[in-house]
Image: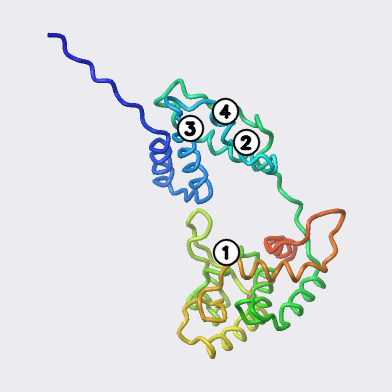
Amino acid sequence: MAESITMKKPLRMAVKVANYLSYRHSLGYELKWEGKALADFGHYADQSGHQGPLTLALALKWARLPAEADPSYLARRLTIVRGLAKYLHLEEPRTEVPPVRILGPACRRKAPHIYSAKEISSLMRAAQRPRQGKGFQPFTLSTVIGLLASTGMRISEALRLRVADVDFKNCIITVRESKFHRSRLIPLHTTVVAKLAQYHKRRQRDFPGSESFFVSQQGAPLPYGIIQRAFHELVEDVPSRGGRPRPRLHDLRQYAGSRVMPGCA
């Protein structure tokens, strides 16, 4: 009797996506936004009844779903599917890998706002005004702005700082597990240390048990959304230059990079 041939059931796209993300995570990639988007793609493909290898038509249809979105956003969606397709192509040769830039460039970097020293001072003064219902004390926003402008830290790094990461004696901040899971030391000027020490003294008085350096009015770690909304209000009156967008928190890094910061004296 001839042996029966067992047909291998094709994997659902959601399973393929999960395998791909597991592989990328094992290499150290976080893929937060990309992971959510690809999970959505896998769900979309399965719900639409797609079977077999990934196709260009399927990738394009999903990438273009938010019809009113910015073209670069649609291109970015297709780019992450392209990464999945290249991975799947190794075991499924009939997988269609989307061509590069078929929907245009996936990244259009906005021109940064290069702050002047006068603008930084004005922002810090404005940040110290009482802001009812904003979820933090006025001097918190001012201190965050000053720290970003003087060190070039990312806002995410500043908000993750713990009290133990700030060495007032040696004028050093330890940034732990930042981009690519790397840590680094940032030297501080004595004037920056003095401002941080002033803030620390006040927050210790109000929230002595909190390990987070920057805290909300409840003593919890300060959320990014709260600080971002407050900053947007601050820069409403800052004139744009040459049609460029309003200043962003991230642009404070450009200010730090454009200046020579003296070492700790």
15 sits to left or right of 67: left
Among the 4 quarters of the image, the one containing residue 62: top right
**Residue at the image point whose x is 31% and y is 26% from the top:** 9
**Amino acid marked by disc 2:** Arg
Mark yes or no: residue 129 visible: yes
Which residue carries the number 4 mark? 98
- Residue type beneath disc 1: Ser
Residue 202: mark = none
Looking at the rendered structure, which numbered label has been put on residue 156?
1
The tag earlier along the polypeptide, 4 or 2, is: 2
In this view, the mark in front (2 or 1): 2
Whichever of labels 3 and 1 marks the residue nearer the N terminus, that label is: 3
Distance (Cα) linking label 4 and label 2: 13 Å
Q: Which mark is residue 48?
A: 3
Mark 3 vs 4, N-terminal side: 3
Quadrant in which the C terminus appears: bottom right
Point 44% across, 34% down: residue: 46
User: Disc 2 marks which residue?
Assistant: 64
How far is the residue under mark 3 from the one under mark 1? 38 Å
Where in the figure is residue 108, as x and y percent of width and height? 71, 44
